[in-house]
Image: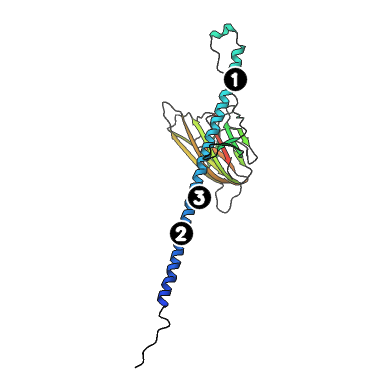
């Protein structure tokens, strides 16, 4: 009786299982690395956004402080020029100075060390012009209210003011922010920040709404502010403007309370 010899292909199924297991392990590893990378990028973006908001708030505080110092200086000069007979009646408060903040830099604190570094980031802040009036502008075949602006703080050549809007001269990522102080009895007020593209491809819309803001108004005490802010990518030739979707709107044209600005990040 002849005995059968060993089967030379007996290890085939086991070898296929091992190969399939290795491919599965590599796939799990790649998915894990992708998830970790995505989480890290999200955390980094959130950190940059929070840091930019802190910079904007510090910038506003510095502008307010300098305006107060100028007011106090003018008030002191007025008191020195007054005669002793006129001291019985309180003088009229001085007119606020023109909203032209003289800041030469944006401050940024380094995390962990507590030190303060000077950072020169291209930026432009538009302040409401109280010497002019709001005007009507047609957008999407509807009448909107536009705000007259004047250039306030400006650094670098990446942005410039043009026709009551911000014109982009250098492509990059920008933190765009805005605020309007409403004094209207209409039940709700708000505004939109719009990007007008210079280059349009295919069926793309030329106007893109970047941010929307809406606030309820108290009919008895009709005073409220609405603020927006976020990071967007802008290209050379694009423009950014702020419009109120009302044919008429009562707003404050004080540069401290109504403004539009952008800071270049990269």
Q: Which residue is mark 1?
A: 73
Front-most of 77 and 110? 110
Identify the disc placed on residue 16. none
**Which one is earlier in the sequence, the residue at label 1 or at label 3?**
3
Asked if the residues shown at circle 1 and circle 3 are in contact, with their CB atoms under 8 angstroms apart, the answer is no
**Residue 142 visible in the picture:** no
Identify the disc placed on residue 31. 2
Q: Is residue 155 above or below residue 24?
A: above
In the current view of this chain or complex, which residue is farthest to the top?
A: 85
Percent coordinates x, y for residue 82 in the rendering = 60, 10
Identify the disc placed on residue 41. 3
Q: Residue at x 59, y 13 (%)?
A: 79
User: Is disc 1 surrounded by few (<14), some (14 to 19) or many (20+) residues within 10 Å?
Assistant: few
Which mark's residue is nearer the viewer, 1 or 2?
A: 2
Report which quarter residue 175 is drawn in.
Answer: top right
Q: Residue at x 44, y 64 (%)?
A: 25
């Amino acid at each position: 009786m002849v005995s059968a010899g060993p089967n030379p292909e007996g290890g085939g199924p086991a070898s296929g299982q091992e190969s399939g297991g290795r491919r599965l392990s590599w796939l799990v590893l790649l998915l894990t690395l992708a998830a970790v990378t995505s989480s890290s990028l999200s955390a980094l973006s959130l950190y940059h956004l929070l840091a930019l908001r802190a910079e904007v708030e510090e910038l506003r505080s510095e502008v307010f402080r300098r305006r107060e110092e100028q007011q106090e200086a003018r008030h002191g000069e007025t008191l020195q020029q007054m005669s002793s007979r006129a001291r019985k009646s309180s003088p009229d408060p001085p007119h606020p100075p023109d909203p032209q903040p003289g800041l030469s830099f944006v401050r940024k604190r380094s995390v962990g060390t507590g030190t303060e570094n000077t950072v020169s980031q291209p930026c432009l802040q538009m302040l409401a012009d109280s010497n002019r009036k709001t005007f009507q502008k047609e957008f999407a075949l509807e009448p909107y209210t536009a705000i007259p602006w004047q250039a306030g703080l400006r650094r670098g050549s990446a942005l410039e003011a043009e026709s009551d809007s911000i014109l982009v001269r250098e492509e990059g990522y920008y933190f765009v922010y805005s605020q309007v102080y409403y004094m209207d009895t209409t039940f709700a007020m708000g505004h939109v920040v719009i990007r007008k593209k210079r280059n349009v491809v295919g069926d793309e819309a030329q106007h893109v709404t970047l941010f929307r803001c809406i606030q309820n108004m108290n009919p008895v005490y009709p005073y409220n502010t609405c603020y927006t802010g976020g990071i967007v990518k802008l290209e050379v030739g694009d423009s950014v403007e702020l419009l109120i979707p009302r044919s008429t709107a009562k707003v404050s044209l004080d540069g401290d309370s109504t403004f539009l600005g952008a800071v270049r990040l990269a």
